[in-house]
Every structure is written in C-alpha cells, then in structure tokens.
Image: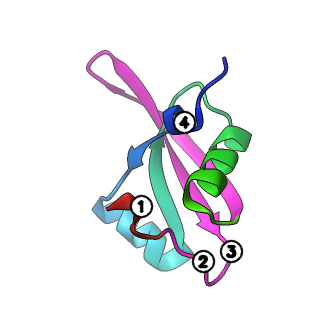
Amino acid sequence: MSLDLRQVIVKPLVTEKSSAVYQLQKAYTFEVHPASSKHQIREALEKLFDVNVTDVRTTGHVVIGNNVFIGANCTLLPGTVVGDELA
C-alpha cells in the first residue's frame, strides 16, 4: 500500500507516558497509520519536519471505534528537535 507522507503520521501523541519517554529517551511519540512501515515513518518525519531520525520503535495496534492505529516512538539525533510544525 502506497501512503502519502502526510497519511503516515496521523498526529503527535502527548500523554503522561509519552512525556516521560521524551524526558528519559528524548523520543517523540506519534500516532501513525497501521499500514505504515518503520522506513515510511522515518522518511515521513525526516521530510515533513527536516530532522534526522536515528531510531523508530512501533507499539501495538490500538482500536478506537472502527479505526485502528499504532504508535511510534522516534528518536532524533542529539540536539535535534521537532519545531513549531507540531503546534
């Protein structure tokens, strides 16, 4: 399945758990399309936010109503941050 870059990243996840992951590992958490691969997630983040991703870890599927989503923790190069694009 071919996904557009903007279809891969659904939205950032901001929860207590994702905030703790950021503080400990400096990893951002995103809700991503269930059909997306780690390579597609990395490519989408690098092109949409102009950052260098060093690691992508996906979590299990979450079912919300009729929709299925997966989470992804993405670690960036040290000193790199995702800018105001998320606001």
Q: Is residue 17 above or below residue 34?
A: below
Q: Tell me the tag on residue 28.
A: none
Q: Of the two numbered discs 2 and 4 on the same chain, state the one appearing first in sequence.
A: 4
21 and 74: which is toward the camera: 74
User: Are the residues at dot 2 and dot 1 in contact (C-beta closer than 8 Å)?
Assistant: no
Farthest-out residue, left:
65
Range shown magenta:
53-82
Residue placed under numbered mark 3 in the picture: 77
Q: Of the two numbered discs 1 and 4 on the same chain, state the one appearing first in sequence.
A: 4
Quarter residue 52 falls in? bottom right
Q: Of the two numbered discs 2 and 1 on the same chain, state the one appearing first in sequence.
A: 2
Q: Main secondary structure of the magenta part?
A: strand
Q: CA distance from mark 3 to mark 4?
A: 21 Å
Residue placed under numbered mark 4 in the picture: 8
Residue placed under numbered mark 1 in the picture: 85
Q: Amino acid at mark 3?
A: Leu
* Circle 3 or circle 1, nearest the eye: 1
- Which element is circle 2 on? loop
Q: CA distance from mark 3 to mark 1?
A: 18 Å
User: Are the residues at dot 2 and dot 4 in contact (C-beta closer than 8 Å)?
Assistant: no
Which of the image's four quarters has the C terminus?
Answer: bottom left
Q: CA distance from mark 2 to mark 1?
A: 14 Å
Quarter residue 5 falls in? top right
Image point 54% across, 67% down: which residue? 27
